Amino acid sequence: MNTTPRAARLATFAYFALNGFVLGMWIVHIPEIEHRAGVGHATLGWLLLLLGAGAFAGMQIVGPLTDRLGARTVVPLSAALCSATVVLPGLAGSAWTLGAALLLLGIGNGSLDVSMNAHAVQVEQAYRRPVMSAFHATFSIGGVLAALAGARTLGQDWSPAWTLGAVAALGLVVAIAAAPALLRSDTGTAEETVAEPGVRRRTPRRIWGLAVLALMIMMCEGVANDWSTLHLSTVLDAPAATAALAYGAFATAMTVGRFVVDRVAARVGPLAVLRGGASVAAAGLVAAALSPWIPLAVAGWAVFGAGLSGCVPQLFSAAGHADPGAAGANVSRVAGLGYLGMLAGPAIIGPLTHFVPLNITFLLPVACCVVAAAAAGVLRPAETAPARQEVAAA
């Protein structure tokens, strides 16, 4: 069955929204699941590392698999896996079963993350203009819908198992229904390359450069996710309801920004988006960190989110376009390191607060933004041919 770029774009929107919705529904049920599994905060913190480990493993496995089989095949399967595994934490009754459930959920999430981004690159190629940022914005919209739906079901005293089971069923329907609209891979050469036994494709240095920048930028996102609210409450003594505005401003600005960035990138180019966005983000975080006034701090977090909004999509897009024959593998490298950065950022800030005040620790993500702005030239397409294949060592 042939499909159109418009239909493929709508289907990709559906998968991004599904991913955000599934993860969001897990997040809003964390307190209830923690209680039912009989684990404390400290144990849960360690168990969440399994979620991250599973996601990283799924990314590295599914990236090359997407190049071999095509995103049209792998995306629906990954979406089905991600949807089916979200019910498992709701069924967990101990730390061991919750850990296993989170590992499997992480694998499903990582698999869908890489495969749907690889397909998004195909859609962008079909449109011949930037469209990647809007997909990432749709992921955020899925998270917002999950927060609203989760609040409703929790208010009705639905058990996590029943709620997440319904989410799994809905996800399976979406995974199947959207599949026919996905684009077929036209990179026959890539499939032949991957299929040859004993042959591997070396990851170019440029891809690792993109991956390191993704680690830095997503580390900044992780810091905002986990520490923005605490910044207002502990440093500026804001009431809990007011402190929540910091993350709300950040998340809203990032989502709105991603709906706008594609048009900006089409006019000025991805390099300018990354360089300008990272610079704006650095200025916003400096304002938030040093402000003695709550309104200015909230505005700073909003500027931080607006600046970061277009950075990661440019990196993912560049990785996918660098070599269409290895788009999945390249995206998996960039997404994998980026995901590690998102996990590491909040963890690094905590120990630093033993030596300096919380707001001063934010100079670390500011420095990451400055480095990203300075190194934005890595987005320029390489003038050399794609990295040649090398026979793997026996």
Image (cartoon, grey):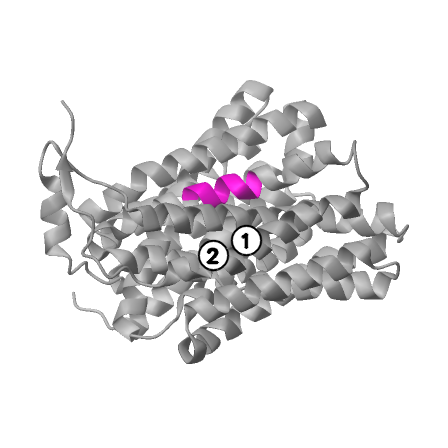
Q: Dot 1 lies on which element?
A: helix
- Give the CA separation, mark 1 to mark 2: 6 Å
Q: Name the residue under label 1.
A: 371
> Magenta part mainly helix, strand or loop?
helix
Q: In this view, does 358 lie to the left or right of 387?
A: right
Can residue 182 be seen here?
yes
The quadrant of the rendering that contains the C terminus is top left
From the top left corner, tell me how far across and down residue 192 is, in percent. 9, 47
**Image quadrant assignment for residue 390:** top left
Name the side, left or right, on which 35 lies relative to 105.
Answer: right
Quarter holding the N terminus is bottom left
Residue 381 location in percent, x, y?
30, 62
Q: Please give the name of the residue rendered at 58% of the width and 55% of the height, measured from the top-left corner.
A: 369
Q: What stretch is highlighted in magenta?
A: 336-343
Which of the two residues, 288 or 302, is positioned nearer the viewer here?
A: 288
Kindly identify the amino acid type of the residue bearing the numbered disc 2.
Ala
Q: What residue sits right under mark 2 in the picture?
A: 375
User: Residue 307 lies in what quarter of the image?
Assistant: bottom right
234 within the magenta span: no
| Amino acid, disc 1 | Val
Mark 1–mark 2 CB contact (< 8 Å): yes
Tag count in the figure? 2
Please, what secondary structure does the residue beneath circle 2 have? loop
For residue 171, above or below residue 341: below
Q: Estimate how packed mark 1 is, as few (under 14), some (14 to 19) or many (20 or more) residues with alpha carbons within 10 Å.
A: some
Residue plotted at (71% across, 28% down) = 41
